[in-house]
Amino acid sequence: MNRTMIVSNRLPLKFSIEKNKLEIEKSVGGLATGLESVHGTDSIWIGWTGLVKEKLNDQLAQEVSEKALNENCVPINLTQWQIKNYYFGFSNKTIWPLFHYFMEFTCFEEIEWEVYVEVNQIFCDVVVSNYQEGDTIWVHDYHLLLLPQMVRDQLPEASIGFFSHIPFPSFEIFRTLPWREEILKGILGADLVGFHTYEYERHFLSAVSRILRHPVHLDKVHKDDRIIKIGSFPMGIDYDKFEKTSMAHQLEKAEDVTDLQYELDQHLKTSPEVKLILSIDRLDYTKGIANRIRAFEYFLDKYPQYQEKVRLIMLAVPSRSNVPQYQALKKEVDELVGRINGKYSSVGWSPIWYFYRSMPFNNLIDLYRSCDIAFITPIRDGMNLVAKEYVATRTDQTGVLILSEMAGAAQEMNEALIINPNNFVQIADALKTAIEMPEDEQKVRNAHLQQRLRRYNVKKWANDFMHALNSTKGNNRIYLAKQLSEDILEKMLSEYKNAKKRILFLDYDGTLVNFVDNPKDAKPGTELVQLITQLSSQKNTDVIIISGRDKESLGNWWKETEIDLIAEHGVWKRNRDGKWEKTENVKKDWMSSIFPILETFVDRTPGSFIEQKNYSLAWHYRKADPTLGEIRANELEDVLKNFTVNDSISILKGNHVLEIKNSGIDKGRASSKKLMDQDYDFIFSIGDDWTDEYMFRELPESSFSIKVGYSKTSAKYYVRDTSEVFSILKKFATL
Ligand code: ADQ
């Protein structure tokens, strides 16, 4: 049976040990509820228990496993050291601040990184040992960024999704991370990568393209032979649960209400004119709590008529209190609340009620229901579910939401009063607008918001993600020629051995040697020269290096080797005797008018340069910014089209290069001409580039054509890289 395997830092269960007795309770968090629809009897959830390994004896550990299994969960127990470095360290002192643009709080500690890798590997081992063929694996959040690729390495065919609950920062921020390549590669092990908003998706794609230099096509990344889909899936809430609980509270008899609701009702009775403003968050610097208090102070100063007419109820839930910045924030908030209450309080009124604790779900609903305004002003927030929960509980459709534009939720909640959390003037005015907003307007705004939240709830979010992940199955491989399998290789070697006359067409850059930044540095190594010499000294074997390169470079590098060379796509030919011969009647008068155009593109595209050959010009942009490079290449192609209409020149778009050359001259024509010299019964061609496609198409059906790398091709087979090319040629050489 196909199951779903959910993997997150924490299990949706709360474990505690009281007097050597294990207590277990189900979590009611958004993620746990959202995944209820995918976490059924035929699925498992893998995560940390929240317990420290040192506190577990064998019997307790066994009990943890059994109790977790009853809930379809597989527990991971971590040591104190691992939690310190992986959770409080790398996850919460590196990734969390960096991804929320808090550079000043970001630590780069080698040891924390090492333990992060170690713990991701522990998760991987548990995933792999529980995996059954056909399972779908869904990995969550920033604690497990390396896990998708770790699992992919061991289970290449598994269907893996990854969802990030936090923002993905812009490239300029992300690039500061010393382990940026590893992190991107880790995430790209997934078939589908999801974010809350398109902005985060865009930043991720930009980092992939700039740092890993993988081709990005709209929302897809091409990595080797795989296609990875990137998408945005804004997480919703369990709307029904909030709406129903809120309605139930409304119908409660006075004697049944919670103590908190009783206090709130008393307050509303005695001071009906006082508007209640609510803020709820984990105590986290990203949530903008200190700034919010200062903005509230600014409001009370700017609009003193509202003193004694408003009250800010602040609920801050303790969080990550082991991390120094959180301790400092706690102190700062305590001081701010104290100072402002001291400054404005009167006998019957204090401006802020501050709670620093977690509250049961029912109290949360009481607060949402009783407060006129929700005041949610994070500096950065992946989504922010509190804003959505507030709106869902407003069953009479009154209430005003003030929301920071820096929360992912702001993208979908246009009807809220959207503010910049650093703009105190704007915040003060938004508070005034909220206080004075007529009820009719509140209802119109909330009606729209509720309609959307009801529809795009957390179950829809989870189902949409799973649906998108399922539809990547079968579509996540690049359209390819066949991989050169062992069988085909055997067949090829046997035909090679038995042939009377063989010919090998070998492209140079990207096939015999890897790409280098400067084309002039691509000289062949001794091993390669020896191999080619060995091949060409075999009886009845013609080895031809066929390249777009100029004849000088090729001629110099292969001066001592008795092989044929074809340079500049076929304009020049050098036979074994070492003499160059011009085989095409080509013009070069067009070059003087094209060269200055290319120069303007070099000026405007840092990192690009011109390579001048005898009969062609190449504009290389391998080292340019990838996005700018592509834009400029398209622009240049357009500009040059004006010239190609009347002139007999054409443009070849290669691997990060545009080459302008005489029309009708290409490797296809050059290789076909060569075949006329003799009767070959073994024809082999290999290349990595667009320009080699001419050759693959022109050579006879019986030939072996091989593409190096994963992109669309007319070749029959493909191999991964230059090292595979080398190993095939070596096999030929020993026959
Ligand atoms: P958080 O940073 O934790 O989540 P948020 O989205 O607001 O932020 O979720 C908080 C949740 O905790 C809400 O469901 C809320 O009801 C609950 N909660 C708050 N105070 C509580 C209290 N006192 N007692 C009990 N429960 C309380 C991260 C990202 C967010 C992203 C979510 C989901 O930082 O940006 O929205 O994941 O992807």
Image: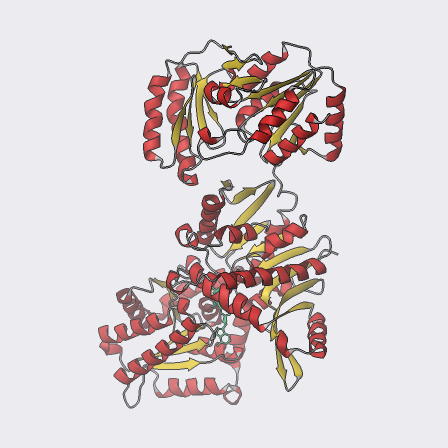
Residue 265 vertical placement versus 522 (above, below): below
Q: Where is residue 144 in the image (x, y as percent from the top left)?
A: 56, 60
530 sits to left or right of 581:
right
Q: Which residue is drawn at 72% across and 55% down?
A: 2
Q: Nearer the viewer, residue 210 or 25?
A: 210
Is residue 686 visible from the viewing direction of this image?
no
Q: Where is residue 283 in the image (x, y as percent from the top left)?
A: 43, 73
Q: Nearer the viewer, residue 433 or 97?
A: 97
How many discs mark residues in the rendered view? 0
Q: Position of residue 532 (x, y in %)?
A: 61, 24
Q: Residue at x 69, y 11 (%)?
A: 679
Residue 66 vertical placement versus 263 (above, below): above
Is residue 39 visible from the viewing direction of this image?
yes
391 sits to left or right of 735:
left
Q: Residue at x 50, y 62 (%)?
A: 453
- Using the rendered view, name the quadrant where residue 137 is placed: bottom right
Residue 227 vertical placement versus 379 (above, below): above
208 sits to left or right of 140:
left
Indicate the quadrant containing the N terminus: top left, top right, bottom left or bottom right: bottom right
Indicate the quadrant containing the C terminus: top left, top right, bottom left or bottom right: top right
- Using the rendered view, name the quadrant where residue 150 is placed: bottom right
Q: Which of 128 and 526 is in front in this view?
A: 526
What colour scheme has been applied to the protein in the rendered image? secondary structure
Residue 616 vertical placement versus 153 (above, below): above
Q: Where is residue 361 in the image (x, y as percent from the top left)?
A: 53, 77
Q: Which of 383 and 163 is in front in this view?
A: 163
- Using the rendered view, name the quadrant where residue 500 is placed: top right
20 sits to left or right of 321:
right
